Image (cartoon, grey):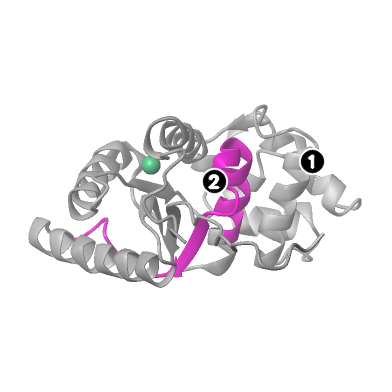
Amino acid sequence: MNRRGSTRVKATRKPIVVLAGEDRNDRRSMRVLLEQWCPDMRGRIVEINDKPTLHQASSAVLAARAETLAAKVRARAALEETDVACVFVHEDLDGVDSDQHPAIRERVEKALAASMRSGTAHYVLAVAEIEAWLLLFPEALSAFAPSWSVPAKYRGKDTGRLEDPKKVLKSEVSAGRYRESDAPLILEKAVELRLLSRPAGQNLSYAQFRSSAIECCTHHLPNGHSRFQKRE
Ligand SMILES: [Zn+2]
């Protein structure tokens, strides 16, 4: 019932979680996963289109690029009339030897965190594309398109070590039908089928992203935050 004359209280906009990356499908894919692992993030994730190119930058350049990104994040929060709870920055690490990943991740994540007002940030390195993550969920791929099937040789493997997971998906799983815009939909299938916590294989960047999401959910999301509540 519409009670005329009652005070309309604008819904409090909770602090947002910003997802930055250059590829729309990758950002959508990450959003599907984050919202599943951390239901508190539902309705508060906003995306910014940004090509970070952070992992190969020298220290000075890295700090400057992190500042630029932080300024964009703040501008977005100002637009949404709220605060930033945390930030996830996605970058593909094509062609970088996997032994270097932990050190690269730590270095960039520190620079990002230093530039953000919240003092927290997560740097997500999807090694050799998000398709490597999709190969962890053969059942979701078959549920998405019944004719698709992941060959046995890719099951139970470290999909982060595959040379070209996109090519595997296209030529060996989907007979040429896979499109990059399918990725978030396939992950939604994986959510539906409750597969996220039991991947059919390993992938370091997937596992890392999952622990970042859980850390963020537990420690960085302020609940009951009311700083921007309108007083009417
Ligand atoms: Zn966080």
Extreme residue in the front direction: 5
Position in image of residue 228 (x %, y %): 39, 56
Residue at image position (65%, 65%) is 180
Residue at image position (48%, 32%) is 214
Residue to which mark 2 is pinned: 41
The residue type indicated by label 2 comes to Met
Position in image of residue 50 (x %, y %): 39, 70
Choose between 119 and 223: the one closer to the eye: 223
Check mark 2 vs ligand 1: CB closer than 8 Å? yes or no. Answer: no
Quadrant showing the N terminus: bottom right
Magenta segment, which residues?
28-57
The residue type indicated by label 1 comes to Glu
Residue to which mark 1 is pinned: 192
Q: For the residues marked 2 and 1, what is the alpha-carbon distance in whole angstroms?
A: 18 Å
**Quarter of the picture for ligand 1?**
top left
Position in image of residue 94 (x %, y %): 41, 57
Asked if residue 52 can be seen in this view, the reply is no
Sequence order check, earlier mark of 2 and 1: 2
The reply to whether the magenta stretch includes residue 87 is: no
Q: Secondary structure at mark 2?
A: helix
Residue at image position (44%, 60%) is 230
The reply to whether the magenta stretch includes residue 43 is: yes
Extreme residue in the left direction: 60
Q: Measured along the vertical axis of the image, is residue 15 above or below residue 218?
A: below
